[in-house]
């Protein structure tokens, strides 16, 4: 059956012009600059960088502006831009032990070297709307106190000393890259971590929450949560040595999970790991819980059939760009497909009708 | 470990410093000191990405965390010295001036530029870092024990 396949160009152009106008909104209101978004909506910028899988605050801010604040649309723009960039190489693995921490807390040890540093957190706020922000508020200077010099050690190091927690032994296996090879199951942990760090925050949060509610419970404590900047060092082939090329802000969460032991492992604490671009702690904690749930097989745990233990389910549904691409494509013209469905239903009805007539006659 | 490596390789140290400098800062310091020498491009500034890696559990096997934008270029001074730069972000002007300083640091101007460009850069960045660390330190919890009932 022939269905019109052309047309709509003018309608599309006019729709685009209208988004531009709607994006701008009331022209009596000052226009947002990229710098304003970058500086004042920084947690949205961080989410777009993390899930867009490209660290560049100005680009993320531009994407948020262009997408009218629709963060998944902004992430889509970043992912599309990313594919146009030539890749010059890969960095040395970042050393989060050398992080300049803005925030560093542990839910498992009260008194730990380096202390509990709250940082710029929403925790302990009362979640009451602050109407002062609706008026012209001037920025307050945050108080300062003399800082102790030196790196802040990881909390898991203390538990390691007693041998009570599984180790993460040093390894230099080149990691697989899902931006170069399609994601295939079974996926090793390095691939799962790459998929999780760019996974949708809401989906990851929901899965992590499901493990807490009993669907593959793994008794997670936040051993440590730290946010801060780390230098990124990259090997420069022309020079024959590596150089620091910049700094990125990261959020790292290490969970400490109760573990009774299994056929292959002694009773000890096990670990889940979350590491995400930007100040993104809800996502990093969620990632650590889901990482731990997905490790059931290598730790010799039972698969209780929980969604968070199912690597295929988790990894193939966690990417919001893949998900939204497939979901939203069903609103685009499917006239031909639908015509054939329509024909089929008509035929079935004719057949059913004919049968009824025949049965009535009998 | 990293620090001793940088001490043994001053070029690595200054390239890292130039890469992490705030936007426009290297140009401001250099242009205040000298007029830029002539050079030719070996590789004109180009924008690309690098894949940032991390380690599972902070110390274990590496995995790909995500990419970051970078700009790189390479140039030769008329006197023959080659300067490189690899810097974060999409910043062609900063990449150019960083490569220029990298090349000039291999000439007789090195000690002058160390004093007028690198040291002020380092000081400015150390101040900014210290200010942030001091704000973090102000949010450090001081615990105190409440009087216990059983005493």
Image (cartoon, coloured by chain):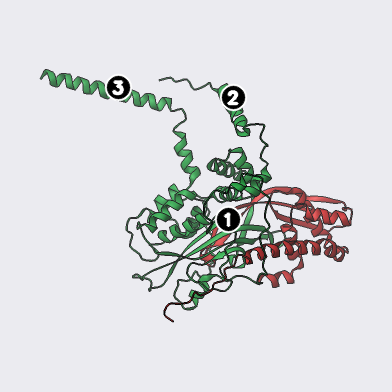
Chain colours: A green, B red
- Determine whether label 1 and label 3 are within 8 Å by CB: no
- Residue A105 in the image: state x and y as whole percent: 54, 66
Residue matched to label 2 = A14
Q: Please state the horizontal and vertical placement of residue A55, each as a whole percent of the image.
A: 62, 51
What's the CA distance linking mark 1 and mark 3? Answer: 56 Å
Residue A251, compared with residue B151, is above or below; it is above
Left or right, A17 with reference to A183: right
Q: Residue at x 45, y 71 (%)?
A: A166
Crowding at mark 3 (Cα within 10 Å: few <14, some 14-19, many 20+)? few
In the depicted structure, whether residue A237 falls above or below residue A258: above
Q: Quadrant of the C terminus of chain A?
A: top left
What residue sits right under mark 3 in the picture?
A: A346
Q: Is residue A148 left or right of residue B35?
A: left
Whether residue B78 is visible, yes or no, is: no
Say which quadrant the N terminus of chain A sits in.
Answer: top left
The image quarter in which residue B64 lies:
bottom right
Q: Tag 3, which chain? A: A
């Amino acid at each position: 059956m022939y269905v019109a396949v052309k047309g709509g160009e003018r309608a599309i152009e006019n729709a685009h012009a209208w988004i531009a106008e709607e994006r701008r909104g009331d022209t009596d209101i000052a226009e947002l600059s990229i710098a304003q978004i970058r500086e004042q909506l920084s947690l949205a910028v961080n989410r777009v960088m993390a899930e867009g899988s490209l660290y560049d605050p100005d680009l993320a801010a531009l994407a948020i502006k262009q997408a009218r604040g629709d963060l998944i649309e902004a992430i889509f723009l970043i992912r599309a831009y990313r594919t146009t960039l030539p890749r010059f190489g890969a960095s040395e693995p970042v050393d989060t032990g050398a992080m300049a921490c803005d925030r560093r807390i542990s839910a498992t040890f009260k008194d730990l070297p380096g202390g509990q540093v709250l940082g710029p957190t929403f925790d302990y706020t009362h979640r009451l709307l602050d109407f002062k922000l609706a008026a012209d508020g001037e920025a307050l200077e945050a108080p300062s106190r003399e800082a102790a010099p030196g790196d802040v050690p990881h909390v898991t190091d203390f538990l390691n000393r007693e041998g009570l927690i599984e180790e993460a032994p040093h390894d230099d296996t080149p990691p697989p890259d899902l931006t170069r090879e399609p994601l295939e199951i079974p996926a090793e942990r390095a691939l799962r971590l790459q998929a999780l760090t760019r996974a949708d925050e809401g989906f990851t949060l929901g899965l992590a929450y499901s493990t807490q509610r009993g669907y593959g419970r793994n008794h997670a404590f936040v051993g440590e949560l730290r946010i801060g900047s780390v230098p990124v060092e990259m090997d420069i082939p022309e020079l024959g040595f590596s150089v620091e090329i910049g700094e990125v802000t990261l959020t790292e969460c290490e969970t400490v999970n109760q573990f009774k032991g299994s056929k292959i492992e002694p009773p000890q604490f096990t670990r889940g790991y979350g590491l995400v671009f930007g100040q993104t702690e809800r996502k990093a904690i969620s990632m650590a819980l889901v990482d731990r749930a997905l490790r059931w097989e290598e730790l010799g745990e039972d698969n209780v059939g929980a969604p968070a233990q199912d690597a295929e389910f988790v990894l193939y549904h966690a990417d919001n760009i893949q998900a939204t691409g497939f979901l939203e494509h069903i609103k685009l013209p499917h006239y031909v497909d639908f015509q054939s469905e329509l024909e089929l239903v008509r035929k079935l009805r004719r057949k059913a009708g004919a049968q009824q007539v025949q049965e009535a006659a009998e | 470990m990293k620090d001793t490596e940088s001490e043994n390789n001053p070029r690595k140290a200054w390239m890292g410093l130039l890469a992490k400098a705030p936007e426009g800062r290297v140009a401001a310091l250099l242009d205040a000191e000298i007029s830029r020498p002539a050079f030719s491009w070996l590789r004109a500034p180009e924008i690309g990405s690098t894949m940032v890696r991390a380690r599972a559990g902070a110390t274990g096997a590496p995995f790909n965390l995500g990419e970051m934008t970078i700009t790189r270029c390479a140039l030769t001074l008329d006197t023959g010295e080659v300067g490189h730069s690899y810097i974060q972000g999409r910043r062609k002007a900063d990449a150019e001036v960083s490569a220029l300083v990298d090349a000039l640091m291999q000439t007789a101007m090195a000690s002058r530029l160390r004093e007028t460009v690198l040291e002020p850069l380092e000081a400015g960045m150390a101040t900014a870092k210290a200010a942030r660390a001091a704000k973090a330190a102000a949010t450090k919890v001081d615990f105190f024990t409440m009087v216990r009932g059983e005493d």
